[in-house]
Amino acid sequence: MKTVVVGMSGGVDSSVAAYLLKQQGYEVIGLFMKNWDDSSVTLTSNCTWEDDLLFAEMVSKKIGIPLHTVDLSDQYRKRVVEYMFAEYERGRTPNPDVLCNREIKFDIFIDEAVKLGAEFVATGHYCRKETFEINNQPVYRLLAGKDPNKDQSYFLCQLSQHQLSRALFPIGELLKPEVRKIADEQGLATAARKDSQGICFVGKVDLPTFLQQKLQAKKGDIIEIPESYYADLNESNELNELSKAFTYKREDGHIMAVHRGAHFYTIGQRKGLNIGGTGKPMYVIAIDVDENIVYVGCGDEHPGLYRKGLFITNDEIHWIRSDIEMNNDDNRKYLVRIRYRQPLQEAILIKKEEGIYIVFEKPQRGIAPGQFAAWYDGEELVGSGTIN
């Protein structure tokens, strides 16, 4: 009988994952991670780690498995939160959920599971894993979850073969309503509990308040770039021209308002700009942290919101399978996602000596440096990288 440690979060998905594994004959151990305990920066106080632990305890008792707890808050702050601060300081928009999976849930957590005698770890992610062999060696494929509305493979886009070798995803074949039905039929306390929102393990936050733990507020100009700016720009498919058309200078627009610090804003942001009287919504289209300028565009279809492509440097490219990595000057068609829940987009990946260029069939809205682009071959997620 193989032993598996389930990451019990206090939510319905991990609860049902633990129940299903026990039904399948595994020796199941629950492990609750305490990763954040600073409630001073969260917007809600009704979803603390103490509440999560209480639900995890009730579910573990109900299905008859032991539950252990581990405090990983120091590692979480160093590996995830400090990374967030560093990326925002650079004017980039990180994805802490992807980092949390790579650095905590499938790294330090695996080490803790091994201490408990486990061969595998399991989570409540909506994704699937398949195994095949090359030269008598196992190779692991990461597949999208069967529920198209809940597929969470994107959040696991940075996992390695070693991490996947240890991972189980018990609910990947199920739809969310089916998961809640199982929880309800088994009388699990989490059956009707709402899904968590906000930053992984932190919750919903006011971003500037959260970032001001480390980053200082600094007033600067919000400058509007008019649509007329783009009138003389010729669209080019040349790789080295992809970014030049959207490099703004102060004199390209006019001052609209004052902000609290360019590093507190993200590409595509609409709320929190404090700009009124335009009659149309304003969106952040670019951030210059060196000059402390936030550039905005007026209207839902402002040209500055869209990009034809993006670039990923070599040191930030990650292939889940080494057998399909691209060589220099390779061109390959994939389906690409630049944020969670975004419909997959047709694109061409072009490998050059300096990195990978992704050129989309249709211009994409709100491409943000620091976010992850993930590329799929059908339902298989094969690689990812941080947008530069």
Image (cartoon, rainbow, N blue to C red):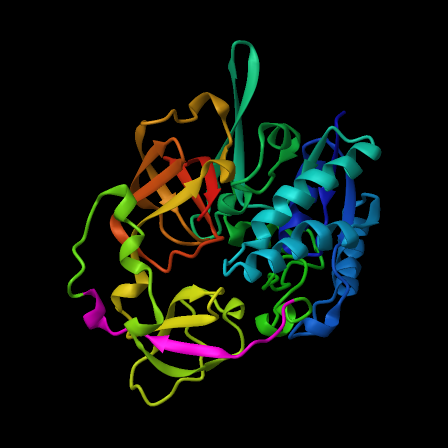
Residue 284 coordinates in the image, percent (x, y): 39, 70
Residue 226 shown in magenta: yes
- Identified at 44% across, 71% down, the residue is 293
Residue 331 coordinates in the image, percent (x, y): 29, 30
Q: Nearer the viewer, residue 266 or 73?
A: 266
Residue 314 shown in magenta: no
- Identified at 33% across, 65% down, the residue is 248
The magenta segment is: 215-230
- Horizontal relation, residue 136 to residue 374: left or right: right
Q: Is residue 278 above or below residue 236?
A: below
Give residue 274's quadrant in the image: bottom left
Please state, as top left, top right, bottom left or bottom right, where the N terminus lies in the image.
Answer: top right
Residue 149 coordinates in the image, percent (x, y): 44, 53
Q: How many numbered badges does the structure rendering display?
A: 0
- Horizontal relation, residue 51 to residue 179: left or right: right
Q: Nearer the viewer, residue 378 or 307?
A: 307
Residue 166 coordinates in the image, percent (x, y): 66, 30
Specify whether residue 267 is in view.
yes
- Identified at 63% across, 74% down, the residue is 209
